[in-house]
Amino acid sequence: MREDICTIPINDVFLPRDGCPLCRMRDMLEKRSTEYITGAAMMEPDVRIKTNEKGFCFRHFDMMLKCGTRLSNALILESHLDKMKQELIPKTVKGKPDKKKLAAVRSMQKSCFVCEQVEWGMAHMYQTIFSSYTSDSEFRALYNDQQFICMEHYCDLLTAAANRGISSKILPEFYSDTSRLAGGYLEVLKNDITHFCSMYDYRRNGQDWGNSRDAIERSIEFLTSERIGGGQQD
């Protein structure tokens, strides 16, 4: 299943040059995973076993409700709730609660089948990025031509780069390029936000807003990796 829904060609992620490419990757993975779970994989026993064990976070429950039918979501919930009922949360308790079961319930609250699929796919995309950046000059140019790298994925890329196959010769250049994509855009945002604030001074009445009108939304996207009004990049 993972090879089908979590393998996305690198050009599909980087060619649009719109926003953060890693946010776009994550959004594509989430969309594929939730559509797959509520569609073709809904009745597959191996998938259902995993979703029963892991459950879903609120974000991905919400996405599943939007992309799948109510019946498909109900069937997934039916077997998930039944597993919890049979194995984790008894109707009555005699004596002290079972500590192992309580720990399992708490662990389930923090687990999500889709999150794990996305993490797996992102880890493989990082590997592809590092490999392509090292060996493919055209990809390196494409990487540098991105609009920006958001704060979350800036941290992820720099943290992972030293451990995932970029040689010590290339690593400083990768650090520099990635920092420029994040730090350069941060400077643009700061200037646009400052300009936006200054336009509320009566002395600026009638002057040009420039690119500052959507500076709040763009700043939030950079800081949180989510777009206002829907959260996902197209």
Image (cartoon, rainbow, N blue to C red):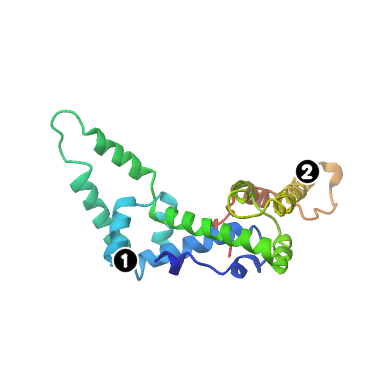
Mark 2 and mark 1 in contact? Answer it, CB < 8 Å: no
Q: Residues within 10 Å of mark 2 (few under 14, many from 20)?
A: few
Label 1 sits on residue: 42
Note whether 204 is above or below 69 in the view shown: above
Q: Secondary structure at mark 1?
A: loop
Residue 142 percent across, percent down from the top left: 71, 65
**Amino acid on which the number 2 mark rests in the picture:** Thr
Residue 139 percent across, percent down from the top left: 69, 66
Residue farthest toward the left in the current orientation of the protein: 94
**Precedes in sequence: disc 2 or disc 1:** 1
Note whether 141 is above or below 195 in the view shown: below
Measured Cα–Cα span from mark 2 to mark 1? 50 Å
Total label count? Answer: 2
**Amino acid on which the number 1 mark rests in the picture:** Met
Q: Which mark is residue 6?
A: none
Q: Residues within 10 Å of mark 1 (few under 14, many from 20)?
A: some
Label 2 sits on residue: 194
From the viewer's perspective, tell me whether residue 28 is left or right of residue 187.
left
Residue drawn at x 59%, y 69% is 12
Q: Could you tell me if residue 98 is visible in this image? A: yes
Residue drawn at x 32%, y 56% is 51
Residue drawn at x 57%, y 58% is 127
Residue farthest toward the top in the current orientation of the protein: 95
Residue 61 figure quarter: bottom left
Q: Nearer the viewer, residue 31 or 205?
A: 31
Q: Could you tell me if residue 18 is visible in this image? A: no
Residue drawn at x 73%, y 63% is 145
Q: Secondary structure at mark 2?
A: helix
